[in-house]
Amino acid sequence: MSKHLPIKVYKRQNSTAVGRLLKDTLKDLWGSHFLAWQLAKRDISAQYRQSYLGILWLFITPVASALIWIILKSSGTVTIADTGMPYPVYAFSGTLIWSILLESINSPTQSTNASRSILTKINFPKEALVLSGVYKLLFNSSVKVILLILFVFVFGVGFHWSLLLVPLALLGAVMVGTALGLLLTPIGLLYNDISRLTTMGLSLIMYLTPVVYGIPKSGIMKTVMTYNPFTPLITTTRALAVGDVPEQWVYYSILMVVGLLLLIFSLMIYRRAIPVIVERLSA
Amino acid sequence: MAGEVLVKVEGLSKKFCKDLKTSLWYGVKDLFGRSSSHEVGALRPKEFWAVRDINFELRRGECLGLIGHNGAGKSTLLKILNGLINPDEGQVTMRGRVGALIELGAGFNPILTGRENIYNNGAVLGFTRKEIDEKIEAIIDFSEIREFIDMPVQNYSSGMKVRLGFAVAAQMKPDVLIVDEVLAVGDIGFRFKCLNAIGELMKDTAVIFVTHSMPMIFRVCNKVMLLHRGQEKLFTADVGKGIEKYYAIFPSGKQNIVGSGEAHVIDFKFSVDKQTAHFGDTLTVPHGSDLHIEMIVKLDLHIKKAALQLVFWNQEMMPVGDVLDTNLQAFLIEQNQHQRHNVTLTIPKVNFNAGKHAMSVMINSPDFSSSYCRLDNAGFINMTSHFASGAHILINGSWSSSLNKTSHKL
């Protein structure tokens, strides 16, 4: 019996082999899925148990922000070039995908921050926090996708086979968002300037992304909006939803590969950073 | 099976920073600049050693009590042992599954029911869903709150939360168990149950136990380490001695007088053999010595009678001896119109356990309806004995044994 006891050594971290770190990260990520599921379930049910409208809130926010733009456009307050599809579908799909992206960027920091009290007291696979964040995102996103499909039908776009690919495209967006957010998490936990900066930065970036209006035909905005890495995430998902051919699919594919690599890299950094952060903050 | 080394700590040190802003900045540096090895072993500005050069080994079946003043580094050491933070120097080797009772019910969500929180807490502690499914009835039974198990935890009392948290944690089967002052909240019945459960766990584990309760240390530990300002002052299997050293850290209390003020203790001196001490002094008393006390008591004129007692307190502030007269009554003095009384008292064969004891003089009305004077910390005696024990008194018993001739096989 005593021969097979697992051995753990704790010492000042020096440059451990990357291969070893990667292996440990993936192993814990896999092993923590029940815990992650449990944490996600806890947060989701706690969130809606203390609310009368409950899950409706998932619809209300993106519908409201799309509604603002629909009113701005229809009242003539702003003029928006033709988007090639009913504008409500365009605006709503934009704000909805954007809200999923925003959530996924914020999720790793939020999940970790909310777990300070257990981080400083119990040793458990920290990857579970990231994974539970992803589970919560997937839950919220799947509810939103249903609403998106509803919009597509109500506004007469109709069914396309590519609609079935929308969840997959959104999964890609969630992955890229989580990877980015996770990279910021270690510093974001030490300084809350980071989360303020990202909130502000992202609300600016939204206007450089075809969320509620399309990419202009010419000018500097055209270049910026085309190469903005958030653009293919929005345009590809939207194109699949309405049955268009995604123009930026090459960019989107590259982004997926980079996103996956970044996610693995961020996870390794995260694993390394947690003990350093736990000693700096106590809950 | 017993005896293998499960915990090995070598030259362990950890530094902390006194200033938050600086601390966060060092955190950023630590995140990026791991290579700056010249900083290892040296303190950066505003840093201090929270734990410095700790070495020990713990085997299966052993229970180490970690004691020391507040901020001595006990919890920091536990956090390192539990892998929550990394040491700055030295290393820790842990063999086997580590279970920690550091904060019970960590991760409880107040809005969810007790039952739901059992699953959450169990998952955090590393159980699988199947394990929790199997154990949930045992957990609910242990916690003794079946009636309220489907009620939101926010309506639980703090004691009930601790019950639930402990019930989940008690299902762990660790090789190394880390316990940090967790049982303070529960009622006596539950504390007793918890101690039994820990005792059960301890049989086959290495335990590291932090508490300020010395009776608890004496009861469960077979080794103690005394930490003082992050350093290892003492590491011994002589638990009694460790506890004695712990008490010696703290200065004795100041004299304190309460009561109506209608009576006063003007002078107080006490002696053993040829040694004499006065008001507020400390006298070393070998176990079994006779203690003589002389004091001058002043009673205001309108006080006709007063009842005197002398009470001994141990370091835990527990009264361990109440000195009465030979009829087990408080000693009565009557007003002598001069107001002043010489009072002498002899206590034969003082048999308190080793350690410092404080004396209080109590002067009450004979019917105990009013307190004229209570003088705390009038003096201190430092008991010494050859036998280490956690009991309050050491009794010289007369034992004997002889051959038993009954042929029953037991």
Image (cartoon, rainbow, N blue to C red):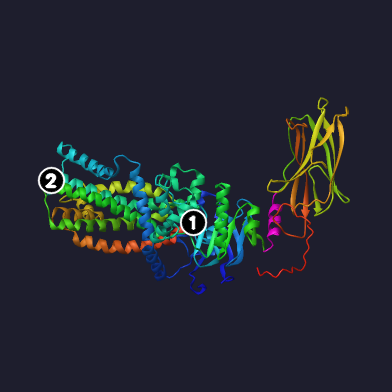
Q: Position of residue B112 (x, y in %)?
A: 39, 47
- Name the residue tied to disc 2: A155
Q: What type is the residue that disc 2 sits on?
A: Phe
Closer to the observer: label 1 or label 2? 1
Residue B198 falls left or right of residue A265: right
Q: What type is the residue that disc 1 sits on?
A: Ala
Q: Quadrant of residue B293?
A: top right
Residue B252 falls left or right of residue B26: right
- Name the residue tied to disc 1: B169
What number is the disc on residue B40?
none
**Residue B138 visible, this angle:** yes
Mark 1 and mark 2 residues within 8 Å of each other at the beta carbon = no
- In which quadrant will I find the C terminus of chain B? bottom right
Query: Which residue: 76% across, 51% down?
Result: B352
**Are tags 1 and 2 found on a single chain?**
no
**Residue B24 visible, this angle:** no
Q: Position of residue A278 (x, y in %)?
A: 48, 55
Chain for mark 1? Answer: B
- In which quadrant will I find the N terminus of chain B? bottom right
Chain for mark 2? Answer: A
Residue nearer the viewer, A150 or A215: A150
Query: Which residue: 56% across, 61% down?
Result: B200
Q: Is residue B199 magenta?
A: no
Query: Bounds of the magenta span?
Result: B237-250
Tag 1 secondary structure: helix
Query: Which residue: 48% across, 70% down?
Result: A6
Residue B207 falls left or right of residue B119: right
Residue nearer the viewer, B350 or A143: B350
Q: Main secondary structure of the magenta part?
A: helix
Q: Position of residue B73 (x, y in %)?
A: 59, 55
Q: In the picture shown, does residue B157 fall above or below B205?
A: above
Q: In the picture shown, does residue A175 fall above or below A58?
A: below
